[in-house]
Image (cartoon, grey):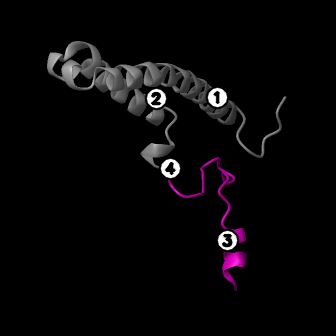
Amino acid sequence: MSQQDESQNESPGPDEAGVPTGPASTPIDHPYFLPVLLGAMAIWFGYDGFIDVEMQKEYPLFNRVGFAILLPLTIWFGYKGWKEMQELKADRERTASHPPGTPES
């Protein structure tokens, strides 16, 4: 058997019981990973740009611009992550109420 044949036999979708058969997900695959990372960076830039007096003397514009860029990105990706979590939750509820192999009414 070639590698191509073996990769076709491995299906990343759910099996008959609804359990995913693909590779295990990582924390990076979580919908809130990027918003949390961006939020932490925005807090860091905001602290250095507006609160920390010593950093305000050295690099005020860099930190303030970084904060101004990261804050809207955090909000945007946080919203997208929230919507993705809602979709995943709805899919799980739909799968739980209608297991594979049973007719939907």
- The Cα–Cα distance between marks 3 and 1, rounded to whole angstroms, is 28 Å
Looking at the rendered structure, the secondary structure element under dot 2 is helix
3 sits left or right of 85 in the view? right
Assign the N terminus to one quadrant of the image.
bottom right
How many angstroms separate mark 3 from mark 2 (CA)? 33 Å
Asked which quadrant contains residue 97, the reply is top right
Q: In the image shown, does 94 or 79 lie closer to the viewer?
A: 79
Looking at the picture, which amino acid does disc 4 mark?
Ser
Location of residue 61 with respect to 103 vertically, above or below: above
The type of residue carrying mark 1 is Glu
Of pointers 3 and 2, the one earlier in the residue sequence = 3
Q: Which residue is mark 1?
A: 87
- Which secondary structure lies at badge 1? helix
First-in-chain label (2 vs 1): 2
How far is disc 4 from disc 3 in space, using C-alphas? 18 Å
Pointer 4 and pointer 1: residues touching (CB < 8 Å)? no
Q: Mark 4 or mark 3, which has the lower sequence index?
A: 3
**Residue 63 covered by magenta stretch:** no
- Quadrant for the C terminus in the image: top right
Residue sitting at x 36%, y 19%: 64
Q: Which mark is residue 35?
A: 2
Q: Are marks 2 and 1 in contact (CB under 8 Å)?
A: no
Kind of residue sitting beneath label 2: Pro
Q: Which residue is mark 4?
A: 25
N-terminal label among 3 and 1: 3
Q: Residue at label 3?
A: 7
Q: Mark 3 and 2 residues: CB-CB less than 8 Å, in contact? A: no
Q: Tell me if 30 is positioned left or right of 42 in this view.
A: right
Measured as percent of width and height from the top left, residue 92 is found at 62, 34
- Residue depicted at x 15% and y 21%: 54
